[in-house]
Image: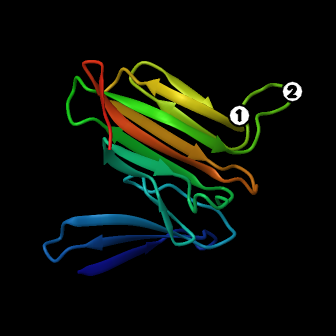
Amino acid sequence: MTISSHRTPKNSAVNAIAAMSAVGRMLSHICLVVLGVYAKACAGHSTLIASYWCGSEQSVPSWIETPFFPAAYPAYATCEWLIRSPGERQAVLIEGFSYQMQAPDALTGKCNKDSLTFFTAKSNFTLCGSDVLRSYDSDSPWIRAVFRARHSANQRGFRVHFSLKSDNVILDN
């Protein structure tokens, strides 16, 4: 395997490294983040934060979690996942989970700080604070989940399980 690297501008804290196989095919794309600075999402929806991977493309059934879960997640982390069902007519179901992130703004009720947003073909919704989501039927063969930690906080984060909904039968792991 050969490694090629590209350094971003001199004042930047991020090095982009592409790992290539012997036949020249891209295996992965990695962003290395200097601790205490910031994280930047990479092509392929993966980010390396303090030696921890977050973000990927996955097939159902599967699960996602914040970096270091159940310990506190790092500040300024951004993770993006794409969860797909194996068939076009099978909807992804978000199973019940609890989460602990920074609370919404006291005046507006908006998730201005840390948040987890789910995007589907038909809708999207954002979670923040601490609560329990029993389940959510995406009515779509895919869900895009984006976690953003905008501030430094000592919060546990989340672990979310995904399963398939097909003809009113839930197939889970």
Q: Does residue 170 appear left or right of residue 75 in this picture? A: left
Q: Which residue is mark 1?
A: 111
- State the image coordinates of residue 107 (x, y, percent, origin top left): 86, 26
- State the image coordinates of residue 84 (x, y, percent, origin top left): 31, 37
Taking the spot 62% from the left edge, 34% from the top edge, the residue there is 132
Residue type, mark 2 in image:
Leu
Taking the spot 41% from the left edge, 66% from the top edge, the residue there is 30
- For label 2, the SS is loop
Q: Nearer the viewer, residue 167 or 20?
A: 167
Q: Nearer the viewer, residue 86 or 75?
A: 86
Q: Residue furthest bottom?
A: 2
Q: Does residue 148 appear left or right of residue 153 in this picture? A: left
Taking the spot 69% from the left edge, 49% from the top edge, the residue there is 150
Disc 2 packing (10 Å; few <14; some 14–19; many ≥20): few
Residue type, mark 1 in image:
Cys
Taking the spot 35% from the left edge, 36% from the top edge, the residue there is 163
Using the image, determine if residue 15 lies above or below residue 46.
below
Q: Could you say which disc has been placed on residue 107 in the image? A: 2
- For label 1, the SS is loop
Q: Quadrant of residue 9?
A: bottom right
Using the image, determine if residue 170 lies above or below residue 78.
above
Q: Quadrant of the C terminus?
A: top left
Using the image, determine if residue 36 lies above or below residue 73.
below
Q: Quadrant of residue 128?
A: top right
Q: Nearer the viewer, residue 88 or 13?
A: 88
Disc 1 packing (10 Å; few <14; some 14–19; many ≥20): some
- State the image coordinates of residue 16 (x, y, percent, origin top left): 44, 68
Q: Nearer the viewer, residue 66 or 33?
A: 66
Q: How far is mark 2 from mark 1, CA to CA?
A: 11 Å
Q: Does residue 22 appear left or right of residue 110 in this picture? A: left
Whether residues under marks 2 and 1 lie with C-beta atoms below 8 angstroms apart, the answer is no
- State the image coordinates of residue 143 (x, y, percent, origin top left): 40, 33
